[in-house]
């Protein structure tokens, strides 16, 4: 088992961190749920004020929670966050929180996006999934939406105003029903099969839209207006790409390599745990398990060094 040398101390630290996180889990999940349900439409400053008040209230009534709460530390997946950056999402915490809210909300997102950064991010992130981009002014947008719902394709409904077509109510409300043992949804006068892989994103260029409750209660409103941190990051990227394009290319390659290394490292760690938990009898007598553990350990060390 020499191939696993050094793993004990690393896993011990992980267990200790998880035990500490478990203590604060009730309050952290309560606050995270509140952020997802209520704070998406607000500015970074107001979100921080609300979470600070909620932390104080949790502590007042005896609900354990982290003193320095961040949504990314509770619900964020570092590998997925790195993927978002590759697809053009700004790396500031406000933008990352928006991505986490989209991922965890039960409702489709309606993004306030006057600068178009959410639009660009969605288009790049979903391009490989045959993203369908539509507008309410398109003559055939209903047909495109029907096909996407049936075949499980993502849809970006862009540039909406303060009113939406009532025919979308069933989609926004996810009014799915069974017909002949198949999930279906009514879209206007038509009944179409509903694929669980279907995803809907909505964006508006309006800076301060006012949506009636008939709409706002059916979607997750998200404020994607650019903030100073995100603007600085994007401007720096533009300057570097103009002045030193080779550095920008190298940075992009390193980001992609880092994301891939993290995915492989996570897969290796999961494989090691799977072998240790499923091995029957004395693991020292299982040659296959020893070989996998040894090779996995070597690759794990190599990838960990690359991540430094």
Image: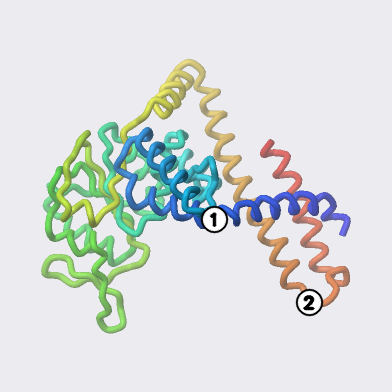
Do the CB atoms of the residues marked 1 and 2 lie less than 8 Å apart?
A: no
Near mark 1 (Cα within 10 A), the count class, few <14, some 14-19 or many ≥20, is some
What residue would you read off at disc 1?
25
Residue at 15% x, 49% y is 212
Q: Is residue 148 above or below residue 181?
A: above
197 or 214: nearer the eye? Answer: 214
Q: From the viewer's perspective, is 238 left or right of 253? A: left
The residue lying at 64 percent from left, 52 percent from top is 20
- In this image, 175 relative to 271: left or right? left
**Where does the image place residue 211, in percent across and percent down from the top left?**
17, 46
Identify the residue at image location x=47%, y=53%.
61
* Disc sitting over residue 299 in the figure: none
Question: In which quadrant is the N terminus drawn?
Answer: bottom right
Q: Pointer 2: what residue? A: 280
Q: Choose the circle earlier in sequence order: 1 or 2.
A: 1
Residue drawn at point x = 18 percent, y = 47 percent: 135
Q: Position of residue 303 (x, y in %)?
A: 70, 44
> Residue 231 in the image: x percent, y percent?
39, 25
Single out the residue that lies furthest toward the bottom.
Answer: 180
Q: Which secondary structure, mark 1? A: helix
Q: Judge by depth and name the residue closer to the eye, 51 or 259.
A: 51
Mark 1 and mark 2: span between their CA atoms?
Answer: 33 Å
* Up-down relation of residue 120 to residue 283 (above or below): above
- Work out which quarter of the rendered image holds the C terminus and state it: top right
Residue 115 lies left or right of residue 285; in this view the side is left
Coordinates of residue 244 in the picture (x, y in percent): 51, 18
Extreme residue in the top direction: 243
Up the image or down, 160 lies above or below 115; here it is below
276 or 50, which is in the foreground? 50
Q: Secondary structure at mark 2?
A: loop
């Amino acid at each position: 088992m020499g191939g696993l040398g050094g793993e004990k101390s690393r896993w011990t630290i992980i267990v200790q961190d998880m035990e500490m996180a478990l203590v604060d889990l009730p309050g952290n999940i309560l606050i995270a749920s509140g952020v997802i349900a209520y704070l998406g439409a607000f500015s970074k400053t107001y979100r921080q004020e609300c979470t600070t008040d909620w932390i104080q209230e949790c502590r007042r009534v005896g609900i354990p929670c982290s003193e320095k709460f961040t949504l990314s530390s509770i619900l964020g997946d570092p590998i997925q966050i790195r993927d978002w950056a590759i697809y053009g999402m700004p790396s500031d915490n406000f933008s990352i929180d928006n991505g986490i809210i989209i991922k965890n909300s039960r409702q489709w997102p309606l993004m306030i996006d006057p600068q178009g950064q959410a639009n660009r991010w969605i288009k790049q992130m979903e391009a490989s999934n045959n993203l369908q981009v539509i507008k309410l002014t398109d003559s055939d947008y209903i047909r495109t939406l029907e096909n996407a719902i049936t075949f499980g394709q993502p849809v970006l409904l862009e540039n909406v105003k303060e009113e939406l077509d009532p025919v979308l109510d069933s989609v926004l409300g996810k009014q799915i029903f069974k017909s002949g043992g198949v999930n279906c949804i009514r879209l206007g006068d038509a009944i179409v099969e509903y694929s669980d892989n279907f995803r809907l994103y909505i964006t508006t260029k309006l800076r301060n839209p006012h949506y009636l409750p008939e709409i706002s209660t059916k979607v997750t409103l998200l404020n994607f207006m650019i903030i100073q941190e995100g603007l600085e990051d994007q401007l720096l990227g533009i300057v570097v790409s103009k002045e030193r394009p080779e550095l920008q290319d190298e940075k992009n390659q390193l980001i992609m390599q880092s994301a891939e290394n993290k995915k492989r490292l996570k897969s290796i760690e999961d494989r090691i745990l799977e072998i240790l938990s499923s091995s029957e009898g004395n693991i020292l007598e299982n040659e296959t398990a020893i070989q996998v553990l040894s090779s996995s350990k070597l690759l794990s060390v190599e990838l960990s060094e690359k991540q430094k």
